Image (cartoon, rainbow, N blue to C red):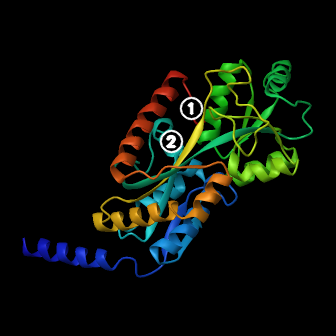
Amino acid sequence: MLICLICQFAATGWAQNYPTKPVRLLIAFSAGSGTDTIGRIMAAGLTETLGQQIIVENRAGASGNIGAEIAAKARPDGYTLFLVNLAYAINAGMYKNLPYDLLRDFAPVAQFATGPYVVVVHPSLPVKSLSEFVKLAKSRPGKIEFASAGAGTAVPLAAELFKRQAGINLLHVPYRGGGEAITAVLSGEVPFYIAPLAPTLPLIQQGRLRALAVTSTKRQPMLPGHPTVAESGYPDYEFGNWYGFMVPANTPRAIIATIHGATMAALNNPSVRKRLNDQGYATVGDTPEEFAAHLKSEVAKMAKIIKEHNLTPD
């Protein structure tokens, strides 16, 4: 009993002094990906509000599961943050033997943003609208390839749902990360991609990629001339990502509260909010309890979709 009390007091004092050194932000996707983009924006904001440098560490591979395992096994001391997104809810339903459990091995801090995707093609593809692309795909069943950041990530699911609604057959080409996938589409190696809007927007503006539609329910201010997928003839289609911070399970509540407060302060910073909004992200800023409920709901929702459509990681 005495030992437990001593440990409790020690943990309390430790939490009160937190943070006393730089904090690692694990991003389990490659540099240049959508998750990396938003992660670095938030890292800059947290560096200011938390009072210590946030060091981004990319650990890409295995649909984000390599980085997730590293984060799950990190010390629960507040010095490892883990950026999670929709991919982890998908992974929970897609893979049977993950080396971690999203809901058990992590503690939620906050969901901080949501973001749409954009349907893009290489400019050499002879289509200028989604309907033209679908017509082309139907004339070449199984021959047009689409890129993704890896099997089990959000993009293959977004593409699969679109394929089924449009009645087309596309060939999936998974890459190690979002950055590699975008590079493949830019080079013309793969002509089609349902991409996160943020890292893709400047490439669209430069004419290096051609946007056909956005996956959100409303048009995006950055691409006002581009319709939604729903407007393009698929009224039931909507797809987006969400982003949040988690820490290893058993991280002291006081430390979680400190990180949460710093996250909310970063979101309230006009420059951070502008950077997020300018790239198509909508800020959220919920409580750890609200984020926990969201995660549980998303895991159940993705498991249902995966089962209904008989989706596999292949």
Q: Quadrant of the C terminus?
A: top right
Residue position marked by numbered label 2 in the rendering: 91
Residue shown at 52%/74% (left/top)?
48
Q: Nearer the viewer, residue 45 or 91?
A: 45
In the image, is residue 53 above or below residue 183? below
Camera sees residue 31: yes
Q: Secondary structure at mark 1?
A: loop
Q: Secondary structure at mark 2?
A: helix
Residue shown at 83%/28% (left/top)?
129
Left/right placement of residue 13 relative to residue 214 reads left
In the image, is residue 208 above or below residue 69? above
Task: Farthest residue to the left: give it.
Answer: 1
Residue position marked by numbered label 1 in the rendering: 312
The image quadrant that residue 255 belongs to is bottom left
In the rendered structure, which amino acid carries the disc numbered 2?
A: Asn
Q: Nearer the viewer, residue 260 or 141?
A: 260
Residue shown at 37%/68% (left/top)?
75
In the rendered structure, which amino acid carries the disc numbered 1?
A: Thr
Other residues around mark 1 within 10 Å, as few (<14) / some (14–19) / many (≥20): few
